[in-house]
Amino acid sequence: MDKKYIYTVGYTLFQKGNIIDVNHLFDTLREHGVNFLIDVRSVPFSKQYPQCNADNMKIAGKELGIPYMNMPEIGAKASSQQEVFSKAADIFFEQEVFPIAKSYRPEKTELLGSDEIVDFRKFRHDEHFVSGLKRIEDAYDKNYTLCLMCSEKKPMDCHRYFLVSKALEQRYGDWLEVRHIVEKPDGGIYFISNSDLDKQLEIFVCEKKKVLNMMFKEEILDNYFGNTEQEKLYDFCDRYWNLLHGWKRFNYNNTENYD
């Protein structure tokens, strides 16, 4: 069975000076057979790039022939009522990593091991989040080809990789393949897969000084989950990444431009 493709993109990939080249964005999607653009930002607005606000993107979609809609149920933020939060120290087990400096955190506050944040593993199975995944499945049953859009240029820094696309391939990987649209060094466009990003994440995490020091501890990966050492290492990296990108419960101040 031939696989279908779902694409992801960050609109800042198409930044020209102080604006986003929305026409180039839609042209790129059209070239690859995309016929519906799904905005996965929890809050589909940007002070810096107002042309990417939901109302403006909807107008652009009508004019340029690719419909646009927002799906906040698969956004990065969770309401405090959702059962998707865990203490940071219960997500990543090496306590010497705490505190996480505020410069690494989405809401720009220091993270302690006792702080509750969105737990990626819980979020990927949350009823509200899964309802969004099922809407994507329904779209493919109707022969749509979707692109999931957020703001970040690099997918590794965005929940469209570490939350949405991982959940999609876990559920629908037998028929659906995720292709992340990224920029070549020469300015062209190419695709990168989830497995490629997993490898990049492993390299990035293991090169960090705090993490590198931990890796010299005997049997550190025995605390993590997987049937092989490689699977345990992926779990280790995924959990560490969770510390840098999981939103705290209740703290949504000054987050309008983080998608």
Image (cartoon, rainbow, N blue to C red):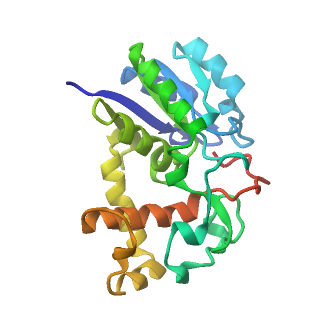
Q: Residue at x 36, y 64 (%)?
A: 225
Q: Is residue 26 above or below residue 196?
A: above
Looking at the picture, does residue 26 appear above or below residue 50?
A: above
Left or right of 70? Residue 208 is left
Quarter containing the N terminus: top left
Q: Position of residue 88 (x, y in %)?
A: 60, 68
- What percent of the width, then of the height, locates residue 24? 50, 28
Does the image show residue 153? no
Point out residue 253 in the picture as x, y percentages from the top left corner: 79, 54
Closer to the camera in the image, 9 or 202: 202
- Classify residue 128 as left or right of residue 231: right
> Which residue is located at x 60 percent, y 13 percent?
62
Foreground of the two, 251 or 221:
221
Say if residue 28 shows up in the picture.
yes
Q: Quadrant of the C terminus?
A: top right
Q: Is residue 192 above or below residue 54?
A: below
Residue shown at 38%/14% (left/top)? 143
Question: Residue 153, position in %: x, y?
Answer: 51, 46
In the displayed structure, would residue 258 be above or below residue 27? below
How many labels were placed on the picture?
0
Q: Would you identify the image quadrant in which residue 129 lies?
A: top right
Residue at the image point whose x is 41% and y is 37% from the top: 168
